[in-house]
Image (cartoon, helix red, strand yellow):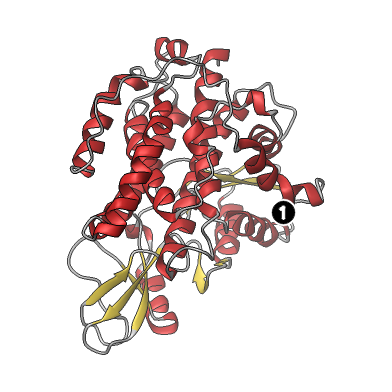
Amino acid sequence: MTPGTIEFLLAFADDEHLMGQQHTEWIGIAPFLEEDMAFASIAQDELSHAALLYSIVADSGEGGEPDDQVINRLAFDRSAAEYRSAQIVEVACTEWAHALVRHWLYDTAEDLRWSLVKQSELESLRDAAAHAAREERFHIRHADGLIDVLLRTPDSAKRLADAVGELLPLATGLFDPASGEAEAIEAGVASAPFDTLLPEWADRVQTRFPDIDIGSISAPAFTGRMYRHDDFAVLITRINSVRGIDPTAVW
Amino acid sequence: MNTTTVDNTLLRRALAAVTTVDDPEIPGVSIVDLGLLETITATEDGRLTIGLIPTFSGCPALATIGADVKAALEVLPEVEKVTVEWLKSPIWTIERVTAKARRTMATDLTLAIKVDSGPTLCPRCGSPTVEKSEFGPSRCRAIHRCGSCFEVIEVMRDR
């Protein structure tokens, strides 16, 4: 597997991983019980997608180290500069309206992103895409159901609109390609650049929030996903806090 | 389920041993009856490889199930080594759950099965149920309520 393909897979895996971790923050403090369960279940799916993607990278190595350890190292032990996540999954959403809007924006983009690898030359990635496609429908349905209800009252509609306004620029960053994307496409790992689906995503956003003028969404400036959001440091410290208590523990 | 034919006796004994492993979240129901077992292969010197598929890729019970399968097989005298592999395909579907498991789930656990054709039926009275929440105590369960006897039931599902 080429370094470019690994970069491409890590960007995808990091997004899934941190999105899953962010969703788990709502367990126990979501506005009502069903949302506790919903965010837990959806987080579980995103974390499993991350594990599938990290495992493809782990399997591409020369071996010697068990896959689980490689997966953990990729997920938890890289420096901030080595992550390739988009800032939308790094930013802290302390308002539930923001968490819900992020969930919708992210899953809508993720649905499109998996569609680009469902016919990948990499069999393990095709298999992962098949798992994800089955699970993603349920995520979007969940977010849509709640947003349908919340858009009907002025107070909650305003909270959602504020969240869309604040989060849209960061969410657009999901389409900032990993630096290895071109290489991955050449190798048949993905079928097209992710940002070719940006207009489709923007259409879905506008249709979802018809009363908000989202303007024209253009492709984000290319950064190679090198820069972490200010909230990343706190997030990664919290993610690693339990593991850090006993690094030798077997989970 | 596919098996190779290195030693039919060993394969039969291995299958019997794996069948004794219950799902940790559905006590009394074997993982084989849930449709998690996909392949068993054996070498002549007693090395077994068990290929399992998860209900959902993020199921937190996978490590427990894998450990239980190993423990059940390692006691067989002719077994030298056991490897458990979680396969990425095929994808588990509700159709893989056997009639026997469905009966146990319905009678002992008030746990129903969601199928594509027609409504989910109450395991107590057989009437159609109404979905109350897509989200249950685990990723593979939803919460329904029976429209007739009003029992609240968990429903196993594959999507």
Q: Secondary structure at mark 1?
A: loop
Query: Mark 1 packing: few (<14 Cα in 10 Å), some, or many (20+)?
Result: some
Please provide percent x and percent y for residue B2.
45, 46
- Would you identify the image quadrant in which residue B27 lies? bottom right
Residue closer to the observer: A179 or A71: A179
Which residue sits at x=61%, y=36%?
A232
Of the 4 image quadrants, the one containing the N terminus of chain A is top right
A1 or B144: nearer the viewer: B144
- Which residue of the protein is positioned furthest toward the bottom in this rendering? B149
* x, y percent for residue A98: 42, 48
Q: Position of residue A45 (x, y in %)?
A: 46, 49
Residue B114 at what x, y percent from top left?
A: 29, 66
Image point (39%, 81%), residue name: B110
Which chain is indicated by disc 1? B
Q: Nearer the viewer, residue B109 or A72?
A: A72
Q: Residue at x 44, y 36 (%)?
A: A128
Asked whether, in this view, residue B7 is left or right of residue A153, the answer is right
Task: Please say whether residue B46 is visible from this viewpoint.
Answer: no
Residue B48 visible, this orientation: yes
Residue B42 falls left or right of residue A120: right
Residue A221 in the image: above or below residue A217? above
Choose between A143 and B84: the one closer to the eye.
Answer: A143
> Disc 1 residue type?
Glu
- Above or below, B72 relative to B100: above
Residue carrying label 1: B78
